[in-house]
Each structure stands twice: as C-alpha cells, then as structure tokens.
Image: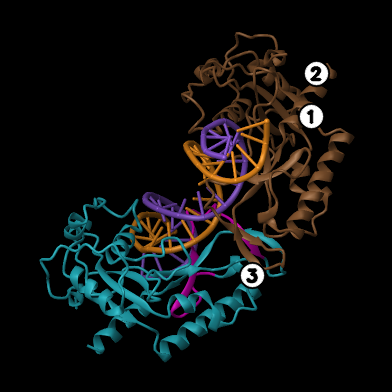
Chain colours: A brown, B cyan, C orange, D purple
Amino acid sequence: MSWLDYHAIMSDQIFVPRVPPASESELMERCRAISGKTLGQLAASADVVVPKDLRRHKGWVGGFLESLLGADAGTSARPDFTQLGIELKTLPLAATGMPKESTYVCTVDMSEYGEMPWEQSWLRRKLAKVLWLPVEGVSAVPLIDRYVGMGFLWSPDSQQAALLRQDWEELMEMLLTVGPESVTARQGEVLQIRPKAANSRMQVAGLTMDGEQTQINPRGFYLRPAFTKAILDSNKACR
Amino acid sequence: MSWLDYHAIMSDQIFVPRVPPASESELMERCRAISGKTLGQLAASADVVVPKDLRRHKGWVGGFLESLLGADAGTSARPDFTQLGIELKTLPLAATGMPKESTYVCTVDMSEYGEMPWEQSWLRRKLAKVLWLPVEGVSAVPLIDRYVGMGFLWSPDSQQAALLRQDWEELMEMLLTVGPESVTARQGEVLQIRPKAANSRMQVAGLTMDGEQTQINPRGFYLRPAFTKAILDSNKACR
DNA sequence: ACGGATCCAATGGTGGATCCCG
DNA sequence: CGGGATCCACCATTGGATCCGT
C-alpha cells in the first residue's frame, strides 16, 4: 500500500487559518483541507518558501504543518493544540508505507530519575492524545512535490499503553542501574533512548549510577518505526 | 571638576587585545592605552560601528569596552575577567563629574529569599573587586566623540562594605515582610531595588509574603549615583 | 537498517545598561 | 530628579525532526 491511502478528498480552497482550532472536529476539518495537497501547493498559498531538501532544515515539515493547522503553544510546555490537549506528530512514510524514521517524543530528564511513576511521566502525557499526520517521505521525490496525507487522532489502546509503560519503566530502571552512558538505542521493544542534541559535544547535568553529578550528552525518547506502523494500521482497521 | 580628570596619557598605538589580560597590571596597562581616546577612535581601530545614540543600544558602551579590554566570561557566571576575579563597570559621567545614572549590579532572586547570609550574597561577590571605567556621558556630546577616562580598581572599604551590607539586609528583610511588590526604589541609602526587565509585562516566579508562588516583574539591585560618586572621590584621594 | 550524530528556527533568560515622564 | 520602564545582543535551550556511516 502507498502513502496515498492517507489522502482525503481534494479541495480547491485556499487554506489559511493561523488561529487555534476551537474543537477536535474543526481540527480534523483542517486536516481534511490540507490532505491530498503537496507541500509546494500549501506553501504557495501560505506565502512560504519550501527548502530544497531537509538536510539543513530537518524540522521544517513539522513546523510548517503546525503553523498551517494553527498550533499555538510555541515554545511553552506543550501540547501543540493547547485548548484541545492534542500533540501533533508528522510521520514521514517511505514508498512502502513504512514510517521512514523513528519518532522523537520528548527528552530524557537526566537530572532526576527514580521516584517518577509512569502515570506522571512526560512521555505518557505527550502520547496521551496525538494527531498523526502522514507525509510522503520518499527521498527521490523533491520536497516541494511531496503529498500530505489525512491526519488521524490516536490515543494508546490498552496493549499499546502496556508496551510503552513496560519499555519506559525498563529504560528508566536501566538509567539507574547501569548508568545513562550505558543505555543504548538497542534497549526497548517499541521505545528507545537515543542522543538528542545539536551534536555529541553537547553536555547537560546528569547523575552517575552512584548518584554523583556528571555531564552527559542529552538523550531523548523515540518510538520505533514498527510501533508507529502499527498505529497507522490500527487506524485503517477502524475506518 | 570634569570627567577629564580621569584621563591618562594619550597614546598613538592602535589598541587590539581581544585575549584576556594575564594580570592586574596588564589589565591596567590596557586601561591606560584606551583612556584619553574617544569611543569613535577606539571603534575605528577595532573596526566597529558606533551607534548614533544609546536610545536603542543602551548597553553598547559597556559591551564594547568589555570586548576591547579582553573580558572573557561571555554569558557564564561572571566575573568579566575570569582569571583575575574582576568585574568591569562603565560609569557615565555628567559634565559636573557626577555619575549620570545609577549602576546596575545584579538581579534580585525572587524565588528564594531569607536563608541567604550577606557573606554569600551575589551582590557582595559582584562588588568584591570592580574595575570602574569612567566614560563621558554628556547627552549633548555625540556618542562617537565621547572620551574614555582612566579606569581604576576598587574594593569596598570597611565603611562602604558596612553601608552595602546594611542596605542589602534591610532590603532582603523587606522582601519578606512587606512582599516584593511593595519594595520601592525609595528604600536603601546607597543601594536600591528597581525593575530590571525588557518591560513591565515580563514576569518571573516569585514568592508572596505568605510564601505562596506568584508572578512578579523582575527586579535588580542598583547603586545610587551618590555612592558611585563617593567611590570616584575616594580613588582620587589615593592618587 | 538503524544507532549514534546532527541541523535549524524560535524563544527565553542574562548581561550590558539608559530612557523618560510626572 | 529619580523611580519605574525600557532596549539590544548574545547565548543556551527547546521543539521540530532527519542524516549518514558502519
């Protein structure tokens, strides 16, 4: 199956919100309005320039679609759609329909682990309600010509929530037992911990296994592609 | 007396350090090299553009002279001359020889007062060793034509230290007893608390009289002009 | 294929202070 | 006059993610 499965009915309307959607249905209406269009078409109607590629503009698609859908929140303590409590995640799809990349969720707080229960975790809150927005992510297709798919709302079902919790608790435990520098991206079934920084020289305050202060490269939680693929599939099954 | 009293011997040398001074004597040598020159002359030799006036460039003189003398520290936890433990303060002088403005020292930590003894206070540490650098501050004289005077090192003498401590302790006490919003710039003999922010809408975390969390306009400690005038005079008396 | 490394834009906080009415 | 208000540059951090060598 191709990424085109996530299209909706084409529309000729120029799309220009820039104010937050007042309801979930209004948000989904906006998603319908942008789906089936290319990034070039949407950028033109918003008077925005599309970069040649993403090498030096890695977050461009996410930021552009956020602004187009009227995400507020800016740099504040999320979610993207403040009033609705909804987080937006773009999902680049390869020609096969598989997510092309893992999905960054949030940073790992290196300054205090232990104590925190899953229920209060940042990761759980970020994933409580997500608007997934599939976008064509085929390298051979110029960025300007890539199609935007139809977004869908998702909250973890009981099985997904259990997987996330299990991985999160295991990873947090490992931070304590083997130390943050020894937790690799190989751990975790659906969730992993990887570097999240401008480069490998960046340092933040952290704690060693012994509870001592130290400096370490910042890390983030990422969802593995197989997990986001399952999310995509579960959405299609419901339609 | 005029601000010219603070000049030193003129020099025709082009002044180009940009590396931190290795010793106090090297720092004072650099001060001598820039004193008696105008901001325009110094800026030209450093290939820097002088703003027309300071209305939209309030900190320009301070920043420019810092870089000229080789202050490191950047945005880190001060002092300006890291190795020497010396803080640089430019002092704009009116034609009368009086400091034209109060002197900003440091921000008031609104999130935790009480507990802190004077000996460990940020204010005391900032003022432990200061390089005062008089600069012509006459509004009628174009910025580019204003002369730089001769800098001098200062540490509070016992009387000055006692005044600072008394004001600081009184002001900190008032923050607790009447609350931060009720402490005005009228309190304090040589030291005062005033707003220090981009504008009056800026807010930071603070504590009410009752110990509750609240939001307040950021404040800073400032030295009153009469006090910095006394510092100037005490320096002249020693020469 | 994927684990480790990296990239940009926007923002908020800090340090440098002076402005400007009443 | 001086107390309250304000202004810029710079840097570190955060949020958006994708790149790329083994």
Q: Which SS does the magenta portion mostly show?
A: loop
- Please rate how many residues cluster around mark 2, counting C-alpha atoms within 10 Å: few if below 14, some from 14 to 19, many from 20: few
- Could you say which is closer to the camera, residue A181 or residue B140? A181
Q: Position of residue B91 (x, y in %)?
A: 31, 70
Q: Indicate the quadrant containing the C terminus of chain B: top left, top right, bottom left or bottom right.
A: bottom left
Residue extending farthest to the left is: B12
Kindly identify which numbered label has been placed on residue A154: 1
Point out the frontmost of discs 3 and 1. Answer: 1
Point out the frontmost of discs 1 and 2. Answer: 2
Q: Which residue is mark 3?
A: B112
| Residue range highlighted in magenta | B184-207
In the image, are marks 1 and 2 on the same chain?
A: yes
Tell me the chain of label 1: A
Q: Secondary structure at mark 2?
A: helix
Q: Is residue A76 visible?
A: no
Q: CA distance from mark 1 to mark 2?
A: 12 Å
- Could you say which is closer to the camera, residue A7 or residue D2? A7
Amino acid found under the numbered disc labelled 3? Glu
- Please rate how many residues cluster around mark 3, counting C-alpha atoms within 10 Å: few if below 14, some from 14 to 19, many from 20: few
In contact (CB < 8 Å): disc 1 and disc 2:
no
Q: CA distance from mark 2 to mark 3?
A: 53 Å
Kindly identify which numbered label has been placed on residue A63: none
Q: Which residue is mark 2?
A: A236
Q: Secondary structure at mark 1?
A: strand
In the image, are marks 2 and 3 on the same chain?
A: no
